[in-house]
């Protein structure tokens, strides 16, 4: 009898655990699918931060990608928010744990930013912005280097994409992860994306599944083994345009194909310019 009670109790506890996991997944939690990234495994990833006067501290707002010694690319919607609130902004490089000032950390203020001339928020189009650093990075290190971009137009090799970021692991939650996370992303074909979202922008890829970006992951790079199983991992796209819910369908995440923006990314810095259409 005593053994029977133990078995029943164990089954009851297991049932509760399954119910909890299901309820968490159903409500949009992402923490059961993401994982801690290897320390400094993405040396070109930047934490874009704004100064919070209330808490007198720097707050992670989005991710960015280091283009060269004085330029970072991120989502335009991030730049417009900085403009609207007149925020003081900096880029924090060489980071893994945002709660610790690591030996590899380099913080540089943003002197200006430049949104794409055709950027619009609704509908979301050309969601890309350049952040110009106030100081040039004088020396690259194993934990801080330029991104290995691929400007090929084709889809990446299936099943070999990752998205790192410090975004929240819960929807509608602005508490970001202090430890760098990564998720596995499988981009869909243009036909599949158009079927799921007829209004999708032509320069965007899409994906859906159990692993997807959270709040604070705008500007995160999509790193893929592009075109061939034997090629190196490269930055091919950037998370942008938020994650609108499509009635009756799974939640989609969107990724701006950077192949179309090579001239913009490599252009000379332009003073503050972010308008909204």
Image (cartoon, helix red, strand yellow):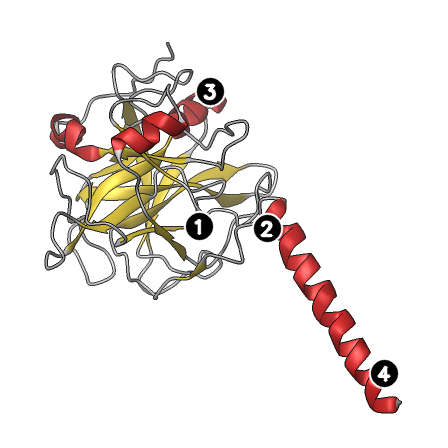
Which image quarter holds the N terminus? bottom right
- Spot occupied by residue 183 in the image (x, y as percentages of width and height): 39, 54
| Residue 5 tag number | 4
At a point 23% along the width and 56% down the height, the residue shown is 144
Q: Quadrant of residue 42?
A: bottom left
Instruction: Of the two numbered discs 3 and 1 on the same chain, state the one appearing first in sequence.
Output: 3
Q: CA distance from mark 3 to mark 1?
A: 31 Å
Determine which residue is flagged by label 2: 25
Q: Are marks 4 and 2 in contact (CB under 8 Å)?
A: no
Q: Residues within 10 Å of mark 2 (few under 14, many from 20)?
A: some
Front tag of 3 and 2: 2
Residue sitting at the far bottom: 2
Q: Quadrant of residue 3?
A: bottom right
Q: CA distance from mark 4 to mark 2?
A: 30 Å
Determine which residue is flagged by label 3: 84
Which secondary structure, mark 2? Answer: helix
């Amino acid at each position: 009898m005593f053994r029977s009670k133990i078995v029943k109790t164990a089954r009851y506890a297991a049932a509760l655990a399954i119910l909890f996991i299901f309820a968490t997944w159903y409500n949009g939690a992402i923490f059961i699918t993401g994982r801690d990234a290897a320390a400094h495994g993405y040396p070109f990833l930047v934490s874009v931060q704004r100064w919070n006067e209330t808490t007198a501290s720097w707050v992670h707002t989005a991710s960015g990608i280091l283009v060269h010694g004085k330029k970072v690319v991120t989502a335009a919607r991030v730049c417009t928010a900085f403009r609207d609130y007149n925020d003081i902004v900096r880029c924090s490089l060489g980071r893994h744990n945002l709660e610790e000032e690591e030996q590899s950390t380099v913080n540089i203020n943003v002197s200006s930013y430049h949104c794409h001339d055709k950027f619009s928020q609704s509908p979301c189009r050309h969601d890309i912005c350049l952040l110009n650093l106030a100081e040039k990075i004088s020396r690259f290190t194993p934990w801080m280097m330029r991104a290995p971009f691929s400007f090929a137009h084709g889809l990446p090799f299936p099943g070999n994409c990752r998205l790192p970021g410090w975004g929240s692991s819960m929807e509608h939650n602005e508490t970001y992860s202090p430890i760098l996370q990564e998720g596995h992303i499988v981009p869909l074909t243009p036909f599949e994306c158009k079927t799921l979202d007829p209004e999708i922008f032509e320069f965007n890829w899409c994906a859906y599944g159990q692993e997807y970006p959270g709040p604070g992951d705008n500007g995160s790079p999509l790193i893929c083994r592009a075109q061939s199983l034997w090629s190196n991992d490269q930055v091919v796209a950037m998370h942008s345009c938020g994650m609108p819910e499509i009635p009756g369908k799974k939640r989609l995440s969107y990724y701006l194909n950077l192949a179309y923006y090579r001239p913009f990314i490599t252009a000379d810095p332009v003073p503050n310019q972010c308008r909204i259409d």
